[in-house]
Amino acid sequence: MIDSNISSLSAQVVLASCSDENHPPENILDGNTKTFWMSTGMFPQEFILRFAEPTKISSLSVDSYNVKHLKIEKNTSPNASQFESVIEKEFECTEGHLQSNAISLNGSSATHMRFIITAGYDHFVSVHRVILRN
């Protein structure tokens, strides 16, 4: 199993439901937990990652703060449309600490992955890093 910095797969954020110039969505891809993407306070919030080519993913880790419920969807088409549900996960509240959640994807292949935050423990949530395991 290989831990991959998601940016090494030529991934990019192709959509984010919000953006703050101090905490842009691209921070999710830099591998640094000190930088992050922050929501604007309403739910749902989402971001879509696109890979340069179809990518097989056995699991991933999401480092976040104040995320309560996350849905992950994928597609294998060249366009970011017609997603299928992969998993929904409830995160525990960590009061002042980053949430680090490993999520099994059972070798799913994807061109795009959509992360939908449907609820948070506060009005604002942040995603600090996504790590893939092939």
Image (cartoon, rainbow, N blue to C red):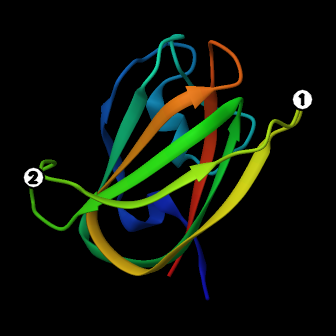
Note whether residue 77 is visible.
yes
Q: Position of residue 33 (x, y in %)?
A: 73, 42
Residue at the spot 18% in from the left edge and 68% down from the top edge:
76
Q: Nearer the viewer, residue 90 or 114?
A: 90
Q: Residues within 10 Å of mark 1 (few under 14, many from 20)?
A: few
Note whether residue 51 is visible.
no
Q: Secondary structure under badge 2?
A: loop
Q: Is residue 15 above or below residue 81?
A: above
The residue most toward the bottom is 1
Left or right position of 80 against 111? left
Q: Secondary structure under badge 1?
A: loop
Q: Amino acid at mark 2?
A: Asn
Please give the count of numbered marks on the rendered protein. Answer: 2
Quadrant in the picture for the N terminus? bottom right
Q: Quadrant of residue 123?
A: top right
Residue at the spot 48% in from the left edge and 24% down from the top edge:
24
| Mark 2 and mark 1: Cα distance apart in space | 38 Å
Residue at the spot 48% in from the left edge and 32% down from the top edge:
118
Q: Position of residue 81 (x, y in %)?
A: 12, 48
Residue denoted by label 1: 95
Q: Amino acid at mark 1?
A: Glu
Residue denoted by label 2: 79
Q: Position of residue 14 (x, y in %)?
A: 27, 39
Q: Between disc 2 and disc 1, whose residue precedes?
A: 2
Q: Is residue 33 above or below residue 59?
A: above
Tag of residue 108: none
Q: Quadrant of residue 104?
A: bottom right
Q: Position of residue 120 (x, y in %)?
A: 63, 26
Q: Nearer the viewer, residue 131 or 44?
A: 44
Residue at the spot 90% in from the left edge and 28% down from the top edge:
96
